[in-house]
Image (cartoon, grey):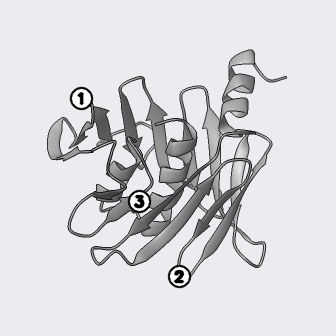
Amino acid sequence: MLSLGLMAVISACNPASESAKFSVHDAKREQLAAISVGEQFSIDTPTLSLTGIFKKEKRKYYDGSNTMQYAVKFSDDGFKLRDHNEELLWKVKLYDDKIKLADNEEMNNAYEIKLREEGKIKLEKSDALVTELRMNSEAEWFQVNEMYTTRGAGLSLAPAVLLIEELKDVEKFILMAELKAKGK
């Protein structure tokens, strides 16, 4: 039997009506990923297309040959990104004013993405500042750093995930989709 809190989390993770589309580009504004969040999730890159399907407390991401590549398991306070063997890749904890990401269950050496003032985002690791971003709600394009640009992401903490070098690009795109779906 699922707890009421977990049932609310599952409902929030599988939005029925709200949808969002955004994209990630390189420095030359060539598209790296088109991301769609809503009733169905999709992540399309030049080399891989993934479709996210919600099943029993998880969203599983399948490739074009219907092979599960990634799974996102939800909890009351966040989610975990797992590989095709369901091994932990990243644990994400959600707070009102920040997001924590770590590659371990204990959240050791975690990254923190914090919203400070309107449009100002800080990325920290182990309480040390990695970088700051200033977003403009009016801008269609947002230059994240010298490598990445986003389009249509709006005021979101999700683009800061692009700055975490340990993440593979496809992991960044999945995490961005899940954060966007959570309203982060």
* Three-letter code for the amino acid on which mark 1 is drawn: Arg
| View extreme (right): residue | 1
Give the residue at x 22% y 41%.
Answer: 124
The residue mark sitting in front, 2 or 3, is 3
Q: Which of 42 and 21 is in front in this view?
A: 21
Residue 84 in the figure: left or right of residue 155 = right
| View extreme (front): residue | 138
Label 2: state its secondary structure: loop
Residue, disc 1: 116
Residue 38 in the figure: left or right of residue 44 = right
| View extreme (bottom): residue | 47
Callout 2–callout 3 Cβ contact below 8 Å = no
Residue, disc 2: 46
Residue 52 in the figure: left or right of residue 20 = right
Q: Is residue 103 at least partly visible in the picture?
A: yes
Q: Earlier in the sequence, mark 3 or mark 1?
A: 1
The residue mark sitting in front, 3 or 1, is 3
Alpha carbon separation for disc pair 2 and 1: 35 Å
Q: Quadrant of the N terminus?
A: top right
x%, y% of residue 24? 42, 65
| In this view, 37 is above or below 79 | below
x%, y% of residue 174? 53, 57
Residue, disc 3: 151
Q: Is residue 89 at least partly visible in the picture?
A: no
Residue 77 is labelled as none
